[in-house]
Image (spheres, coloured by chain):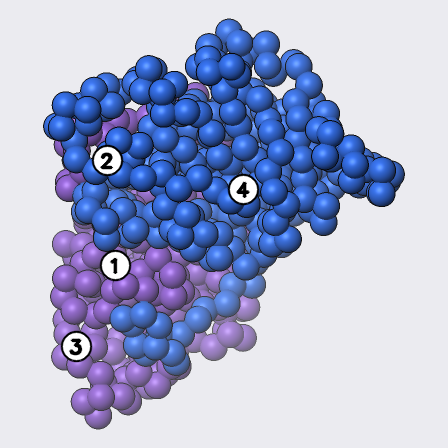
Chain colours: A purple, B blue
Amino acid sequence: MSTVGNSTNIFWQESPIGKTERQKLINQKGCVVWITGLSGSGKSTLACSLSRELYTRGKLSYILDGDNLRHGLNKDLGFKAEDRVENIRRVGEVGKLFADAGLICIASLISPYRKDRDACREMMHDSSFVEVYMNMSLQLCEARDPKGLYKLARAGKIKGFTGIDDPYESPLNCEIELKEKEGECPSPVAMAEELVTPRDFLAPPCSVSSSASLSSSSAASLSLSAPTSASIPIAILTPISFSAPFQRIVQFAPSLRVLLVTFSTLIL
Amino acid sequence: MSTVGNSTNIFWQESPIGKTERQKLINQKGCVVWITGLSGSGKSTLACSLSRELYTRGKLSYILDGDNLRHGLNKDLGFKAEDRVENIRRVGEVGKLFADAGLICIASLISPYRKDRDACREMMHDSSFVEVYMNMSLQLCEARDPKGLYKLARAGKIKGFTGIDDPYESPLNCEIELKEKEGECPSPVAMAEELVTPRDFLAPPCSVSSSASLSSSSAASLSLSAPTSASIPIAILTPISFSAPFQRIVQFAPSLRVLLVTFSTLIL
């Protein structure tokens, strides 16, 4: 019996079939790919493309889209500070369940506050949380404004809009960072081209990466993010080329590239 | 743009990979198996057994256990009336997501109020909601009292305990009903025997059933539940034998049994 949160007299129920069995069953590693960034930065586009690409590789993924969840699980929440916190918390908890179920769960939501994202990372005891930062400038996102929300925010019709009158706290230790090229918002065509061109990718030395493909619909380039000892970047980006800093790592660990490929087959 | 619940300025994001694709990928039909009944009625035992049996058949399931979720997603909720409603609602919403992901989602929680369960059923637009009623008597559950909660409730140390000082509203139109035999709480041994003995199962005339196996750890017998036009019983009980009322249906539709078997292969 335990008291947890506001619940008392509750028991933990173990299941005979655990994450390990489920992962074996569908031959993949359950994880959460958490895509964060400003409105209009291409999170949903990336989520959809990633889902499609994983599907073509026979991998089961599921998208937790911030807006979509506000039609269901989170429809009782608004955009007050405490509601935003609760919104992120619930997505984190559901993402954890999906990862535990063995799925590659793609969470796509602005999630502007570092503290809230880190709390979701902390939920994942086995470090299968992959934070993807859509590092697109406000200027670029506002120029795109695919939902017309920046206009409304500038006109004062939406209050507390991230990037306008509410802050976005960029990740300090994300696994993957995506940037625009020369201030240009990537087009779907550019994305298609990007699919077949090499990308930079830097994995933390102690982590594993993979050769699975990212068919993103944004022609973003991958840049280096600081290694985090608590994180394991997953296997979503290919073809892989190694950035200069990574090449330096490879000088000290010539077999690392082999390891990366090996692990990628385990993960994806 | 839409206003949904307490959220405004939100958009629905379509994914290129939908439920159909995911179901094809893992060769099963996503659904929610909602197990309801008194504390101590064997819900968790059934959930675990069902999960194990599905696993042996290569099917991916995931258990949403009421108590377990109170350690995470629902840890902000207590047992007040409004908290109970919200608890069930969230499990329903998450179950819907899992079903949409293609999984056989097994929700196991007392869920005492008909209205709340029906609300969860209503969430599932494609009628893949299977309500399983653990129809065990209060006397039997209280005699088992596996968590010692009935004792606490009788001593007044737990208020609003279902079956003692809070009502349990039995389903009117559940797909599957499980009953004890002659007032006896089934033992695991009896359950194991039950696995290989024929069971009664009545499917709604317009619905499909299956021949997949239920390795429940309760020696419960399956009895007839009223047909519901909005429901599709899934494929969890085998070997199937047909109850007398169902035999009458078969008289009018001699090919129905063939249909059942055919559909079972589609579903599981």
The numbered disc on residue A204 is none
| In the rendered image, residues at marks 2 and 1 fall on the same chain | no
In which quadrant is the N terminus of chain B drawn? bottom left
**Residue placed at 21% from the left, 38% from the top?**
B160
**Which of the chains bears the disc numbered 1?**
A
**Residue placed at 30% from the left, 51% from the top?**
B85
The numbered disc on residue A160 is 3
Q: Amino acid at mark 2?
A: Asp
* Residue named by callout 4: B174
Q: CA distance from mark 3 to mark 2?
A: 46 Å
Q: Nearer the viewer, residue A253 or A81?
A: A81
Q: CA distance from mark 1 to mark 4?
A: 33 Å
Looking at the rendered image, the disc whose residue lies closer to the viewer, 3 or 2, is 2
On screen, residue B248 versus residue B129, left or right, reads: right
Assess disc 2: are there few (<14), some (14-19) or many (≥20) residues with their C-alpha within 10 Å of its C-alpha: few
**Residue placed at 38% from the left, 18% from the top?**
B140
Q: Quadrant of residue A1?
A: top left
First-in-chain label (2 vs 4): 2
Q: Position of residue A20 (x, y in %)?
A: 43, 27
First-in-chain label (3 vs 1): 1
* Residue named by callout 2: B165
* Residue named by callout 1: A87
Q: Secondary structure at mark 3?
A: loop
Q: Amino acid at mark 1?
A: Asn
Residues at badges 2 and 1 in contact (C-beta under 8 Å)? Answer: no
Q: Secondary structure at mark 4?
A: loop
Q: CA distance from mark 3 to mark 1?
A: 15 Å
On screen, residue A89 versus residue A70, left or right, reads: left
Looking at the rendered image, the disc whose residue lies closer to the viewer, 2 or 4, is 2
